[in-house]
Image (spheres, grey):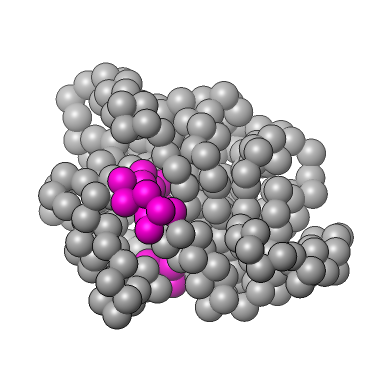
Amino acid sequence: MEVVIAPAEQLAVLAADAIESLVRSNPATVLGLATGSSPLKVYDELARRHEQERLSFARVRAFMLDEYVGLAADHPERYRNVIDTEIASRVDLGPGAVQGPDGLADDLPAACAAYEAAIADAGGVDLQILGIGTDGHIAFNEPGSSLASRTRIKTLTRQTRLDNARFFDDDVDRVPTHCLTQGLGTIMDARHLVLLATGPHKAEAVHQLVEGPISAMWPATVMQMHPHATVLVDDAAASRLQLGDYYRQTFESKPGWQGL
């Protein structure tokens, strides 16, 4: 696992660099897209590069991590709509290029199985963007999730709903109680995982992710088993890391050609 500690703006540039390198070398790259606040600066940087540097996503396919169950198709916080607003509509992703689990399906288990099949049919995800919750969840894999789990329905914890209430006028009762989410096993199938975290409220989760024991109580710790995982954090999110100085030294000494 590579840990990079830098200002938030630099983290976004590093993540965008990794995505641009993939897309320019393989225009049919498959990306994994996350919602929440963590990837927003990355999406801003990708949109800038599309507008100013002719970075094209015309042949790219993308898969979302998760979706709320039961939100109306036109609800602004439905993750399909959020992804369209934050990135898809700002670049030249083609019609139908972004897929997500169907939170409005009549048969939710069947929808989850179909989503797993769609990712496999696309050849798997080349680079998956991730955020992390204050309780260590990635996607909506809450504490206690199986480390081998696949796409499925999950009940959101009270803490996750409180964290997400800011998107629902600070009213936790308006936050759905269920979601469909890629499982930890599904996420681990991606060829490169890039997780971003900023702010002091993420410090304990980042500490557990990077330096804690692998445990379902901190689901993101499964990333320690991934052969190509990158953790991008600012100083505040890195404040609990015992080996913070070593991670800084390692990144400063890294050969320029190596990339993330």
Most foreground residue, 44 or 184: 44
Q: Is residue 85 left or right of residue 189?
A: left
In this view, the residue in front, 22 or 48, is 22
Residue 52, quarter of picture: bottom left
Bounds of the magenta segment: 22-43
Residue in front for this viewpoint, 151 or 189: 189
Left or right of 247: which side holds 202? left
Residue 73 within the magenta-colored segment of the rendering? no
Q: What is the quadrant of residue 169 in the picture?
A: bottom left
Q: Residue at x 26, y 76 (%)?
A: 51
What percent of the width, then of the height, locates residue 235? 70, 74
How many marks on residues?
0
User: Is residue 30 magenta-colored?
Assistant: yes
- Position in image of residue 252 (x %, y %): 76, 72
The residue at 55%/34% (across/down) is 188
Q: Is residue 85 visible?
A: no
Q: Residue at x 35, y 63 (%)?
A: 167
Above or below for 173 versus 238? above
Residue 28: where, in percent of width, then height?
31, 46
* Horizontal and vertical percent position of residue 19: 44, 58
Instruction: Indicate whether 61 appears above or below 50.
Output: above
Whether 40 is drawn above or below 217: the answer is below
Q: Quadrant of the C terminus?
A: bottom right
